[in-house]
Image (cartoon, rainbow, N blue to C red):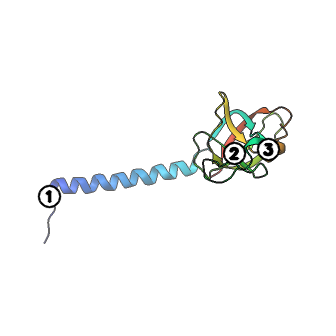
Amino acid sequence: MATRSFPATLAAGALAGAFLSIAVSTAALADAAPVTQKGKASYYSDRFQGALTASGTPFDQQALTAAHLTLPMGTKVKVTRPDTGKSVKVVINDRGPYVRGRIIDLSKRAARKLEFIERGVTKVKVTVLD
C-alpha cells in the first residue's frame, strides 16, 4: 500500500484549492457586469485606407473595426453615444488612439453609424461584448 508524506498531501490540497479558486473566479466573472469605458471617440483619416493594422490586416474604412490601446485583437465591443443613444458594434483590430483623452478610434463607417463625421470627435461608452 502506497502512503503519502505529509508535505505531499498538503501540496495536493493546496493545488486542489487553487483549482477551486480559479473555478470560483471564472464563475464570478461570468456573472459580472460588462466591462465598460467612457471617453471620447474619433475616426481614422482616409489616408490610412489600406495601411496594415496592428492585427496584420489592411485597414478598411468600410469595415466595422476600431483601434483601442489595451483590448485584445478580435474583441467585439459596442460603442454608444450617450447623447443620442445610437450605437454600433465593432471589432478591435488595431492599437490607438494616440491622442490624449480619446479611448477608441473608429472606422469611417462606424463613425457614420454614430453620426459624428461632421464633429470629428464625440463622447462614447465602450462596452466589451465577449
Percent across and percent down for residue 19 are 38, 55
- Residue type at mark 1 is Ser
Percent across and percent down for residue 55 are 60, 51
Q: Earlier in the sequence, mark 2 or mark 3?
A: 2
Q: Quadrant of residue 125?
A: top right
Q: Residue at x 24, y 53 (%)?
A: 11
Would you say 116 lies left or right of 48 here? Answer: right
Q: Residue at x 65, y 27 (%)?
A: 100
Measure the alpha-carbon separation of dots 1 and 3.
Answer: 65 Å
Would you say 110 lies left or right of 52 here? Answer: right
Q: Is residue 113 above or below residue 122?
A: below
Q: Is residue 66 above or below residue 1?
A: above
Mark 1 and mark 3 in contact? Answer it, CB < 8 Å: no
- The residue indicated by pointer 1 is 5
Q: Earlier in the sequence, mark 1 or mark 3?
A: 1
- The residue indicated by pointer 2 is 66
Q: Which mark is residue 128?
A: none
- The residue indicated by pointer 3 is 108
Q: Is residue 100 above or below residue 57?
A: above
